[in-house]
Image: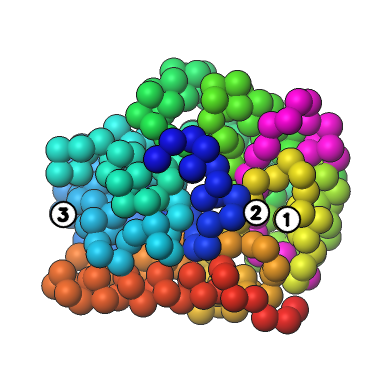
């Protein structure tokens, strides 16, 4: 799968992107949700081995193919790992799934109602390694808690600065300025974010395109101008704490947006399941998210 095929799949493929990128402090929580308690490992290495086994089980499931899962976002250690003796990005591409890599290193403390990304001094080396492994794009997350224009403008500015670095490395960035769905100012934050994103997209030099990963808006259809923007390859939605049924219901109300779910995709999977039960449960989740991504109802 070359870059042109991956780009075409991201722009117009029917399906959604699986977010398999829990890292660092979120890994124990992800393992617990999977049915593996804290005492099951005695070192960080063992912890990451367990999460890699879980991700490998998902990726190799008969339900997990490019027919409905058009892309997958990986944690750095997963990208560098192997499944069945093959590099994980190559295994994904063989299954028709476009590989992405999470590049951010976590969040700064809140200021002006937002949390910027921490510095990424080793980003160039990571991007070079990802490109060499055949990865198509990246994902970078920051968080908006309040409708503070100064803070939201700072988030968008930082996101586009990093995106420029990613584009220069020959990869496609997924820009993720997440609006906290529990924010008391959520609707106003959505509107400010839309304005700031449109301004930054309109000022992009050259012909480069980016992807956007956004919280499902409080007002369905609010992000329609982003879906149709000439500089946007695809707009994807995060589940943001919604259950799968809630996230799918909201997603179906937003034209042109597809899912990029993590917890909402994996919430019913358990370590102790038989392979048959695991594959059936994953397949049901994939079908539900695929439907919400491709069949839209009225807002």
Neighbor class of circle 3 (other Cα within 10 Å; few <14, some 14-19, many 20+) is: few
Q: Is residue 225 above or below residue 182?
A: above
Decide whether residue 203 is among the magenta residues. Answer: yes
- Of tags 3 and 1, which is closer to the observer? 1
216 left or right of 275? right
**Residue 290 in the image, given as x and y percentages of width and height:** 49, 70
Write down the residue under mark 3. 40
Kindly identify which residue carries mark 1: 227
Q: Secondary structure at mark 1?
A: helix
| Residue at figure coordinates x 42%, y 59% from the top left | 69
Q: Residue at the spot x=74%, y=47% of the render?
A: 113
Question: Is disc 1 in contact with disc 2, using a CB cutoff of under 8 Å?
Answer: yes
The residue stretch that appears in magenta: 199-219
Mark 3 or mark 1, earlier in chain: 3
The residue singled out by tag 2 in the image is 235
Please tell me which of labels 2 and 3 falls first in the chain: 3
> Can residue 191 be seen?
yes
Q: Position of residue 126 (x, y in %)?
A: 43, 24
């Amino acid at each position: 799968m070359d870059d042109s095929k991956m780009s075409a799949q991201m722009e117009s493929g029917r399906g959604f992107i699986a977010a398999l990128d829990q890292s660092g402090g979120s890994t124990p929580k992800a393992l617990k949700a999977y049915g593996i308690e804290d005492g099951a490992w005695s070192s960080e290495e063992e912890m990451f081995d367990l999460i890699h086994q879980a991700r490998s089980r998902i990726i190799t499931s008969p339900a997990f193919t490019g027919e409905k899962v058009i892309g997958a976002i990986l944690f750095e250690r997963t990208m560098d790992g192997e499944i069945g003796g093959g590099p994980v990005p190559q295994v994904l591409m063989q299954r028709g799934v476009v590989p992405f890599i999470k590049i951010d290193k976590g969040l700064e403390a809140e200021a002006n109602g937002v949390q910027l990304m921490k510095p990424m001094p080793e980003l160039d080396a990571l991007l070079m390694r990802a490109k060499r492994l055949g990865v198509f794009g990246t994902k970078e997350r920051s968080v908006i808690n309040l409708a503070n224009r100064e803070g939201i403008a700072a988030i968008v500015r930082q996101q586009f600065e990093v995106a420029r670095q990613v584009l220069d490395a020959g990869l496609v960035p997924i820009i993720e300025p997440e609006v906290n769905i529990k924010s008391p100012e959520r609707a106003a934050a959505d509107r400010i974010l839309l304005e700031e994103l449109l301004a930054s997209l309109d000022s992009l030099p050259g012909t480069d395109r980016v992807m956007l990963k956004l919280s499902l808006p409080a007002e369905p259809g609010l992000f329609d101008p982003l879906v149709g923007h000439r500089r946007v390859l695809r707009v994807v939605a995060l589940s943001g704490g919604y259950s799968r049924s809630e996230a799918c219901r909201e997603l179906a109300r937003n034209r042109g947006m597809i899912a990029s779910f993590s917890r909402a995709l994996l919430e019913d999977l358990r370590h102790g399941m038989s392979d048959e039960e695991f594959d059936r449960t994953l397949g049901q989740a994939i079908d539900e998210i695929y439907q919400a991504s491709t069949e839209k109802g009225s807002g």
